[in-house]
Amino acid sequence: MGFPENFLWGGATAANQCEGGFDQGGRGLANVDVIPTGKDRRAVITGKREMLAFEEGYFYPAKEAIDMYHHFKEDIALFAEMGFKTYRLSIAWSRIFPKGDEETPNEEGLRFYEELFLECRKYQIEPLVTITHFDCPIHLIKKYGGWRNRKMIAFYENLCRAIFTRYKGLVKYWLTFNEINMILHAPFLGAGLTFAEGENEEQIKYQAAHHELVASALATKIAHEIDPENKVGCMLAAASYYPYSCNPKDVWESKKSDRGNYFFIDVQSRGEYPNYGLKMLAEKGITLEQTAEDTALLKAHTVDFISFSYYASRVAASEDSGVEKTEGNLFPTIKNPYLEASEWGWQIDPLGLRITMNDLYDRYQKPLFIVENGLGAVDTPNEDGKINDVYRIDYLRAHIAAMKEAIDQDGVELLGYTSWGCIDLVSAGTGEMKKRYGYIYVDRDNEGNGTLARSKKQSFYWYKKVIASNGEDLA
Ligand code: BG6
């Protein structure tokens, strides 16, 4: 018993948070480049403050990030040293199609990822590729308004065709959209949306989500046609909601909140909008423009597996409960008095991972893949310059143990585990470098100072042991 023999252990990153090289190799500008650190970040991410170019007086951390663009060989060698079986990364759309609406892809961009995948293959590391992890060419936003425009489906299709064709035989696991439900909470990040004063934001967000869902089904279709070996997954920012109390009103609130997230995966996994979702849209006065072709695509091309991120559990309470809110992965939630929280207020709950896995598996009965999990923390080197990140090891140990229980005791099917930010990278939420998740430390600070040198933390050696023992040795 325990983890299956071919379990895919590894780590995860996203292009915009680690690559840098924003203007190299013919790459075009993207939404993720123009998101600054500091007080305006949240307004930009949520589409309330339009920033479609670099502005004076701001720091843009994604421009250089940890410069994986030039360090990928060194970084992949370190992943291999830990024994990674898989490495989750994302493609920067504007490296392949710099503007997004060209007919032919940028050869230099295609070559960059080809070399990266070959480097993975050299160490028998299976790439797991997110087609879009929050990025969108800026030209598509300026000219078409991002995913609010149906034309985006065709541009995304071109991207998919180009990469599925070029990387056939090199990549088998694909994720269509990172955390698709994030479009509701961070619409500029998730879909390149900005809003004019007085616009009906909900209408636009759900229509944009519909375009992404159709694009996701189309990608699944094409992936299977180009190579029947391809496996395509959806990706949810997951974490089941607990009711704040056994007051039926709180229980009802938690059910509604869960459905707010399942809404997307229900479509991607079951092939149609769920009844509660249709009622919810109607109640909000939202009309989705959906063609017969869309409906057919959604129905016929559901995903092969369900991937998700899990950092912290969530709590829901009815409006009249008057309870306090806390932070959590761009979703403010309610404080759970039974849990400790990270330095950023994210509530640490390994059993919540087991609960979430069971909820998702019961609902969809498709294999799961945990593609993000980890602890964002400040790491301070000791006198010898070493980082003894026991807090991170404790977090990961408890979550891996919970995963094991879900497999062993509950019969959940789990394909793999890629912990988030296996190498320190820029935080998506805050843009900080000091919110670190890695097994590998990168010498760079919030203001962009540092040598970019990589070094191994204590957790590096620990994770190596975990992988070598296939999850048996968590000590
Ligand atoms: C997920 C994203 O929301 O959480 C990642 O897919 C992100 O891109 C991760 O980095 C952790 O969030 P943060 O804000 O700590 O970087």
Image (cartoon, rainbow, N blue to C red):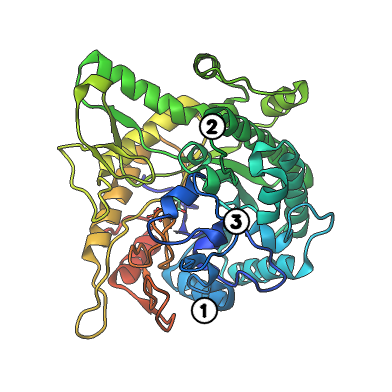
Q: Secondary structure at mark 2?
A: loop
Report the amino acid beneath label 3: Leu
The answer to whether residue 214 is left or right of residue 245 is: right
Q: Residue furthest left?
A: 337
Cα–Cα span, label 1 and label 3: 33 Å
Residue at 25% from the left image edge and 45% from the top image edge = 347
Report the amino acid beneath label 2: Gly
Residue at 25% from the left image edge and 78% from the top image edge = 381
Residue 37: % across, % down: 42, 62
**Residue picked out by circle 3:** 52
Kindly report which numbered mark, 1 or 3, lies closer to the viewer in this rendering: 3
Residue 263: % across, % down: 51, 27
Residues packed near mark 2 inside 10 Å, few (<14), some (14 to 19) or many (20 plus): few
Label for residue 74?
1
Residue 330: % across, % down: 39, 45
Report the amino acid beneath label 1: Glu
Kindly report which numbered mark, 3 or 2, lies closer to the viewer in this rendering: 2
| Residue nearest the observer in this picture, 312 or 303 | 312
**Could you tell me if residue 297 is visible in this image?**
yes
Give the mark, 1 or 3, whose residue is nearer the N terminus: 3
User: Where the C terminus falls, by quadrant?
Assistant: bottom left
**Residue picked out by circle 2:** 198
